[in-house]
Image (spheres, rainbow, N blue to C red):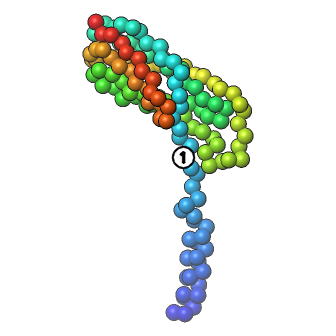
Amino acid sequence: MKNALFVLLPSVFVALTSCNLFDREPDQSVILSVTKIEAPATVSTGSSFTVTFTVQFDGCMHFDRLAVEKFNTGVRVVPWGTDATIGHPEIVCPDILRQQSQAIQIDPPFSGPFQVYVDQGRLAPVTATIQVQ
């Protein structure tokens, strides 16, 4: 029994120390900012329409996706990206701002006025109102 523990305990110790559960890559997800919303002023009740967002980010960030929640009277949009500096403070980023246009199509049914709401995290939301005729 003593020999079995002598062999087993070092093996368990090596296995636990080589598998560090706390040494994971950090979540680099960030909410990006939107500098402009392009949407029609009015739309017809049964017609689809497109809303275009100008997403802004810096040299170490990349645009990933628009998370979209559609409701009958509006849409909530969150522009998601990644920031390479999160968890990697040694990374030096170019001091540039980039912009990328992203569009979504809104299909009926919807009612008006139709509110486009962009959640920008710590920044104030950006909104647009579209009249439905």
Quadrant the C terminus occupies: top left
Residue at 44% across / 30% down in the picture?
119
Q: Residues within 10 Å of mark 1 (few under 14, many from 20)?
A: few
Residue at 53% across / 31% down in the picture?
32
The residue closer to the viewer here, 100 or 16, is 100
Q: Amino acid at mark 1?
A: Asp
Where 20 falls versus 7 (above or below)?
above
- Specify the quadrant of the image occupied by residue 4: bottom right
In this view of the protein, can residue 47 be seen by the observer? no
Please indicate whether residue 15 sits to the left or right of residue 43 in the image. Answer: right
In this view of the protein, can residue 9 be seen by the observer? yes
Image x and y of residue 116, in percent: 39, 21
Residue at 39% across / 12% down in the picture?
49
- Specify the quadrant of the image occupied by residue 132: top left
Where 104 falls versus 91 (above or below)?
above
Residue at 36% across / 24% down in the picture?
75
The residue closer to the viewer here, 2 or 122, is 122
According to the image, label 1 marks what residue? 27
Image x and y of residue 7, in percent: 59, 84
Image x and y of residue 14, in percent: 61, 74
Secondary structure, mark 1, is loop
Please indicate whether residue 84 sits to the left or right of residue 47 in the image. Answer: right
- Specify the quadrant of the image occupied by residue 59: top right
Image x and y of residue 99, in percent: 60, 22
Please indicate whether residue 59 sits to the left or right of residue 51 in the image. Answer: right
